Amino acid sequence: MLKVKKKAKPEKILLGEEIYILWQDGHESRISYFDMRDACPCASCVDELSGEKTLDSTKIPKNIRPLKSEYVGNYALRIYWSDQHNTGIFHYKMLRNFENSQK
Ligand SMILES: [Zn+2]
């Protein structure tokens, strides 16, 4: 397991072909939008009680893209997706530990 410093915060976030995050400690993350949307942790994508994923990955458009993003406090990023989904709050800790499925 990759250990994350508590203060790992993004220095810069770019929404290009994929999401690019430069962290304050110099680490770089690149996450595909599909994988990120697929990992949405919100209550309509994950069962709050069991923690099980209820989102049907096959329903996510392959060309899913973020329309905009905004910072939530100083701990997370909120994405407004092109499939009208915008309730997912992506904690930096989660983004930092994110592993793309297509590798
Ligand atoms: Zn969601």
Image (cartoon, rainbow, N blue to C red):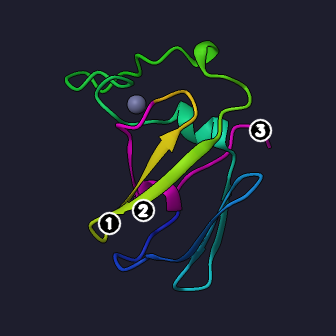
Q: What residue span does the magenta drawing correspond to?
A: 85-103
Q: Mark 3 or mark 1: which is in front? A: 1
Examine the rendering and report whether any part of residue 49 can be seen. yes
Residue 43 % position (x, y): 28, 28
User: SS of the residue at dot 2?
Assistant: helix
User: SS of the residue at dot 3?
Assistant: loop
Task: For the residues labelled 2 and 1, say whether their Cβ atoms are less than 8 Å apart.
Answer: yes
Q: Is residue 7 left or right of residue 81?
A: left
Few, some or many residues within 10 Å of mark 2 (<14, 14–19, 20+): many
Label 3 amino acid? Answer: Gln
Q: Which residue is mark 2?
A: 92
Examine the rendering and report whether any part of residue 1 can be seen. no
Mark 2 → mark 3, Cα distance in angstroms: 21 Å
Few, some or many residues within 10 Å of mark 3 (<14, 14–19, 20+): few
Answer with mark 2 or mark 3, whichever residue precedes in sequence: 2
Residue name at image x 46 percent, y 68 percent: 3
Label 2 amino acid? Answer: Tyr
Q: Which residue is mark 1?
A: 75
Q: Is residue 59 above or below residue 26?
A: above
Task: For the residues labelled 3 and 1, say whether their Cβ atoms are less than 8 Å apart.
Answer: no
Residue 8 % position (x, y): 43, 76
Q: Is residue 11 above or below residue 29?
A: below
Query: In terms of depth relative to the viewer, which is nearer, 99 or 33?
Result: 33
Q: Is residue 8 above or below residue 90?
A: below
> Is residue 94 highlighted in magenta?
yes
Residue name at image x 63 percent, y 13 percent: 58
Q: Is residue 71 left or right of residue 82?
A: left
Mark 3 → mark 1, Cα distance in angstroms: 26 Å
Quick check: which quadrant has ligand 1?
Answer: top left
Q: Which residue is mark 3?
A: 102
Give the label on residue 91, or none.
none
